[in-house]
Image (cartoon, rainbow, N blue to C red):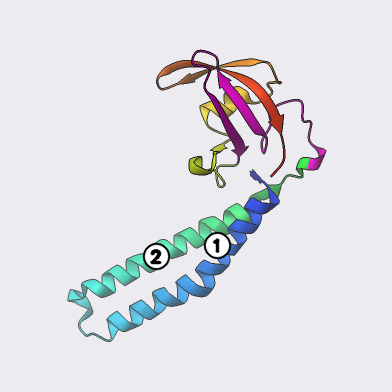
Amino acid sequence: MAYMSQKGYDKLVAELQRMETVDRPAASAAIAEARDKGDLSENAEYDAAKEWQGKLETKIALLKQTIMEAKIIDTTHMDTNTVQILANVELRNVKTGMKMKYRIVSETEANLREGKISVSTPIAQGLLGKKVGEVAKIQVPQGIVELEVVSIDFDE
């Protein structure tokens, strides 16, 4: 089961729709075009088009499964006192004083460039259940990092 926001769910549905209505016909057209070029046993274009179609169908199946198992969370009814999935958390590194802000999301919504980290990451796991002012000691590849929770909110 994948917990996600309504926005994340809508994004996945739109991506599935694009794959089924745009990418799938394009893959079929590429196969047909390559097939028209002759001998299939030595046709690299045909092999590449078939491989693309296979990968696309796998992605579509996985996306359908994720959408089917999705559990949309309404953040308006969540306890804003503790760090939970879909929380925006402002943190301060105790050692360096550096501040950072992350949104804890499902694995399908994770995007570090947008400041969205997966709930299954060590940092998110270490923060879950913490309150403002508490310090989480988290094991990361570089060692143990101590992060103080500065603020928690659920605004999108």
Q: Earlier in the sequence, mark 1 or mark 2?
A: 1
Q: Marks 1/2: CA distance?
A: 17 Å
Badge 2 density bin: few <14, some 14–19, many ≥20, Cα 10 Å: few
Viewer-side label of 1, 2: 1
Q: Quadrant of residue 36?
A: bottom left
Tag 1, which secondary structure? Answer: helix
Q: Amino acid at mark 1?
A: Glu
- Rendering coords of residue 91 (x, y %): 60, 24
Tell me: residue 138, above or below residue 30.
Answer: above
In the picture as drawn, the residue positioned furthest to the right comes out as: 77
Q: Amino acid at mark 2?
A: Gly
Q: Which mark is residue 54?
A: 2
Disc 1 + disc 2, Cβ < 8 Å:
no
In the picture as drawn, the residue positioned furthest to the left comes out as: 42
Tell me: residue 119, above or below residue 7.
Answer: above
- Rendering coords of residue 1 (x, y %): 64, 44
The magenta segment:
76-105
92 drawn magenta? yes
- Rendering coords of residue 99 (x, y %): 55, 25
- Rendering coords of residue 132 (x, y %): 70, 20
Q: Which mark is residue 15?
A: 1
Tell me: residue 152, above or below residue 54.
Answer: above
Tag 2, which secondary structure? Answer: helix
